[in-house]
Image (spheres, rainbow, N blue to C red):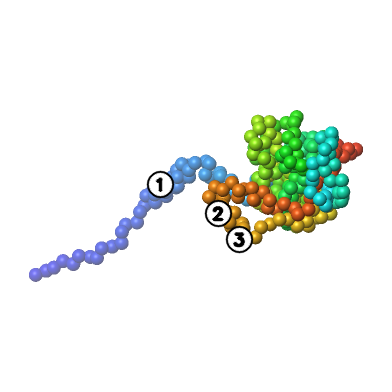
Amino acid sequence: MGCSVTPPPGPPPLLSCHHRQNRNTIAHLTRRSLLLSTPLSLTLKPPPSSASPPPPPPPDTTITDRVFMDFSLCPTYFRPLSSPDPKPNLCPDSIPLGRLVLGLYGHLVPLTVANFKSMCTSSAYKGTLVHKLFPGQFFLAGHQGDKPGDVRRPSGLARNTETVDSKSFALTHSRPGLLSLNLSENDDEDDIKLDPEYRNVEFLITTGPGPCPDLDYKNIVFGSVLEGMDVVTAIASIPTYRPSEKIQQFNDFAEFLGDERAGNARALWNKPLKTIYISDCGELKVAKPSLSPSLP
C-alpha cells in the first residue's frame, strides 16, 4: 500500500513592496495625526520661569518732621498746687535727664504724625508722666486722665483712621528707639474712651536691647529717636514695681472670679519707682522739610 508524504510548511510569503509601503504610510499618518491633534498650547508651552515676583517696596520712612521732648526726674511725687496756671509746675525741684529728638514718618502715616506733632506744639504733653516702664522692652507716656501728670483730653485732633488700616502696621518694633502709637497696651480711663470725641494720644518708645515682637502689628510705628538714646537708656534703668509670682497668681485668680480690685492692683504694676515726666516739648524747625531716614 502506498503512502504520500506531506511536505513541511514553508515560510510565510513575503509581503510585496506595495503592502509594506501601505503599512508604513498608515503608521506615518497615524503619528502625524496624533501630533496635529495635540493642542498648540501644550506643544508650544514655554518652560517654567524660576524668577519669583519682585518684592513690594519697603515702607516710606522718610523723616518729614522733627519734634523734641525734654525728660526730667522728680524726687517727690507730683502734687497739685494752687495756681491760676492750667499747667502749674508740679515739681519745682526736678532733675533734668536730657532731650530726645524724634523724627516722624509723615509720608507713611500722616494722620498719626499730625496728631502727635499737634500734641507737642501745643505743649499738651508738657508736665505729663512716663507712667509705665517695661524693663528691657519699652516705656509708655501720654496717658489720659484727670490726675496730676495725666494728659488732658485733647481737642481739635483729626479722627485717626490709620488705626484700622493694615498698611499702617507695616513697620515692626525691631530695635531700640522706635516711636509707636500705643494701641495694644493703652490704659486710658474707660470713661474717656467711651467719649465719641476720644482721640488716642498715648505713645511708647522701645528701649531695647532687643526687638519687641509682641508689639508688632498691634501698634503703629511712626517715628524714631534721632538724638538722645542715652536719655532712653537712663529712663530704662529706673526700677519699677513688680509683684512676686505668688501675688500675680492670686491676682489672676481674683480676675477669674470677676473681682474688679484685680484690675486696680495691676494698674500699679510696672510703674517707675521714681517720677519721670516730660518737662518740655515742641517742634524743631529744619532747613529741609524732608530728611533722610539715615540720619543719626
What residue lies at 68% left-to-right and 51% top-to-bottom?
A: 268
Check disc 1 and report the residue beneath it.
26
Tell me the SS state at disc 3: helix
- Front-most of residues 36 and 124: 124
Dot 1, how many residues are within 10 Å of its Cα: few (below 14), some (14-19), or many (20+)?
A: few
Picture disc at residue 246: 3
Which residue lies most toward the left here? Answer: 1
Which residue lies most toward the bottom here? Answer: 1
What residue lies at 31% left-to-right and 59% top-to-bottom?
A: 12
What residue lies at 84% left-to-right and 36% top-to-bottom?
A: 83
Tell me the SS state at disc 2: helix
Which residue lies most toward the front here? Answer: 82
Vertically, is 221 above or below 245? above
- Front-most of residues 184 and 176: 184
- Front-most of residues 78 and 284: 78
Amino acid carrying label 3: it is Lys
Measuring from the top left, give residue 63's x and y in whole percent.
Answer: 81, 41
Picture disc at residue 106: none
- Give yes or no for contact between labels 3 and 2 (Cβ–Cβ under 8 Å): no
Picture disc at residue 253: 2
